[in-house]
Image (spheres, coloured by chain):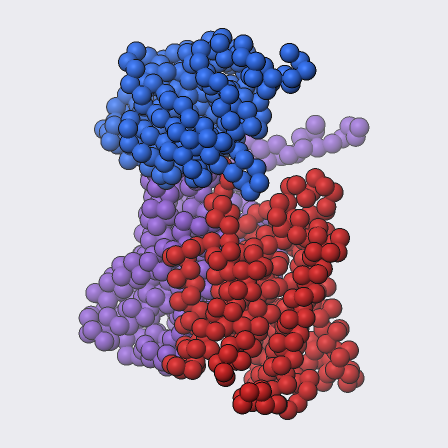
Amino acid sequence: MDKNMMRKERIDRGLKVRTEGIYAISSYREILYLLGPRLLLIVGIIALPFLLELAPYWKRVINIMCVYALLALSFDFLANYVGLVCLGGALFTGVGGYLSAIFNVHLGLPIYLSIPLATVTGSALCTALLLPCLPLRGVYFAIITLMYPLLLTRVIEALDILGGTNGITGLDSFPNAYIEQYAIIIMMLVFLFGMRRFVNQDIGLVLRGVKDNDQSVRASGINVTHMKLLAVFVASFIGCFSGAYVAHLYMWAGLSLFALDFSIIPIASVVIGGGGTLVGALIGSFILVPLSEILRAFGSFRIVIYCAVLTGFIVFKSEGIMIYLQRKYHQFERWVKV
Amino acid sequence: MEILIYGIINSITLSLLSLGFALVYSISRVPNFAHGALYIMAGYITWLFLNKFIAFPYPLAIILAISLTSIIGALIYRFILIRIRGMEISEIIATYAIGLAILEGLRWGGLRGMTFTLPPFVAGSIQICGTNIDYQRLIIVGAGILIFALLYLFTHFNKIGLALRGIAQDERAAMMLGIDSDMTAIISLAIGSGLAGFAAILLLPLGSIIVEAGYNVLIFAIAVCVIGGLGSWGGTVVASFIIGFAQILTEAFLSSHYQMVVALLAIIVTLLIKPSGIFGKQKELEERV
Amino acid sequence: MSTETVLSIKGVSKSFGGLKALSDVSFDIQQGDVFGIIGPNGSGKTTLINCITGFIKPASGHVYFKGKEITAWQPHKIAHVGIARTFQIMRPYYSLPAYKNLIIPLWSPRARKTGGWRGGGKHGDRDTVAVDILEEIGFERDSRVPYKLASALPTGYLKRLELARCMALRPEIIFCDEVFSGLSMSEIAGMLPLIEKMKMEGITLIMVEHRLRELFRVANRVMALNFGEKLVEGEPNFVIENKLVKEAYLGSEGI
């Protein structure tokens, strides 16, 4: 027996233990410990456009980054809190974007009506499209969501509806640059903190129960298909909002709204950023999207890189950045002799 | 008459595309979303052997390409999927990512435009019952029937083939009889990828090798398998005939643009009416208590 | 104890491929019974529960709850009318703490309709009610146990958690699938008062058990199954003396 065997010991930090329950507001140190990271995120992301005042190209990138962050948020929620793996986030962006275009261009509604309406009707439509596979095993959901964006692209192309390959042009843009910038940032933060609240509410717990053991949920008298329906509606709500936003950002709704990027980058963001933490989805996309811009010169090779990294993370079961950071923040680790 | 002939050709084409996917899923429960990617990759490898390297004779290039694709399929399992076996979510994401990496990698590596073609085996066409049919299409039908017969014989009379069927029916029981589930999965992925390659070298001479076709193949394979019932080989064949004829009929009476619409509608209708597919077993849909 | 028949099973059969799991099983359960179902392994006990509670569709036969036919209903509907069940292979919600596990049944439409256990479901704060239920079951209230993640609890606590999950629904019938298995004598001794308490609340219990001595202490009627067929039904001591039942457990040469 090797007498010098070491093991890793993890103990909660004193400050963390002192912040349980009511003691969290007992002094500034505890409050800061809890609020610090959250404030950092909120202040950081709101201040970012000002910091990049001299680089308008990168200000645009922030908008796209938040869009992908929202899609990653919906993927994380569905996959890690409800157990449904959605391989086709592009379905939500496509439906949201095209609907927004229809409301704005064909029906003449102003932008502050077309985006909310597109979000709501889009979610209803996506939920209806995904409804048939909800009572089935998880594999079916993955297959169907994978297939829908690819199929819808080809259907639109073949039937030449909704503008065909040219798409629908002439969407209104945002009334001013600040609204364009901050609408998505604010909504991203709202959805993030809203979802964190949601998954800890009673109804969120039921959804998490569905992921862990849906037979037990059935035996408790709850219709699991209805619960999954609710979850898909919430996730597509977030996704369709991003789609509607993107359509108005580019003032165009075309086949690129169903692009693979909208499906694969959220998945990669969640895996890299830490699945199950909701914040990890945002962190992941904050890393991946600027990276993607930098690698733009490589063309399709970007996707190869994402996929390779994604596979690496999944296979080697890496926990993701956020989980690693949380662990470091909340706990001491040290090597002790066995 | 024309519709009958083209219907048969189209159906056999679809079943060639889908059988690889169905086989892999039924035996190792891994949905191989890299199926379409392996298809295109096989075609591209054949093209490379024919054109880039010293000009290989066509049959040798084909054999090499199919073997390479099978080996790559087996390697994917051995080095990547084996570590996440059993975790459905991770398997799905991993195969999807690999497939995407292969396809987009090929696109970056130069597979753009319509210039990549494979020559047909026998040029020319013949007249059957008043319709013009390429020799290549006849070969497709013939080869398809041949491969189905081979697969049937293999899985009913060969020890390894029987082991594959055993694992497909009940994994635990088969393992208790000494059948190595991992080895079987490697073999099934090799055969499935090989089938994808086989389909590729048969079908790609009809058109050109383009990356988009990889996604189309994946869509059709999934559509056929869902409709026929994930895990049922007979169902796959029957479903490919149903969709094959449906597509030909819409092409004849409406327009050829509706092929994809047919696939989409067929999937939705199946999910609404009989979600487990034609020959699927209902109990497989929900977890056992 | 009233003699109203709450559950009536008639001619239920189920086959899995070539295996006949259940053959024409029929029995009636009165209100307030503690009904035991015994039989060697593979006799179809769990399949019977699955068929009655909707997790498996019986090939033939009927199930009546208080006169209403509930055959082949969906599991959540059957739970909604008041028939709860535990699972033999326990799977609590591992990612949630123990008391949060009970939020799910307390959130269900049935708990909202009937008020849940002790009226908590309707107006009470579900967290408090959950901890109350756990305390009744035997989790020590002031310790960390109710707040631990379900993945960290030992079997004894998990079995009780399963029962708590059923209780939270305020059911009329509970199917207990091998609740005593895997427990030590002291843990079983801790569960017996719980069963008495449920009897007093008027809940009808149907218990599938292997541990006959403990079962016979609480059960007032027992039915024996073997190879999917009903052998005999009646008082516990009568059933255990029956020749067929002895043969089923001990083999014909052991008699």
In the rendered image, the vertical position of residue A22 relative to residue B178, given as above or below: above
> C253 or B34: nearer the eye?
C253
Chain ID for blue: C
- Image coordinates of residue B104 in percent, x first then y, are 57, 71
> A141 or B206: nearer the eye?
B206
**Looking at the rendering, which quadrant does residue A97 occupy?**
bottom left
Q: Is residue C189 left or right of residue A315?
A: left
- Quadrant for the C terminus of chain A, please: top right
In the rendered image, the vertical position of residue A1 relative to residue C222, given as above or below: below
The residue drawn where x is 31% and y is 61% is A125
- Quadrant for the N terminus of chain A, please: top right
- Image coordinates of residue A329 in percent, x first then y, are 50, 40
**Looking at the rendering, which quadrant does residue A207 occupy?**
top left
The residue drawn where x is 45% and y is 39% is C59
The residue drawn where x is 69% and y is 42% is B175
The residue drawn where x is 33% and y is 37% is C77
Q: Is residue A5 left or right of residue B19?
A: right
- Image coordinates of residue B182 in percent, x first then y, are 70, 49
Q: Is residue B128 visible?
A: yes
- Image coordinates of residue C116 in percent, x first then y, are 29, 26
Give the mark count. 0
Name chain B's colour: red
Chain ID for purple: A
Q: Is residue B36 visible?
A: no
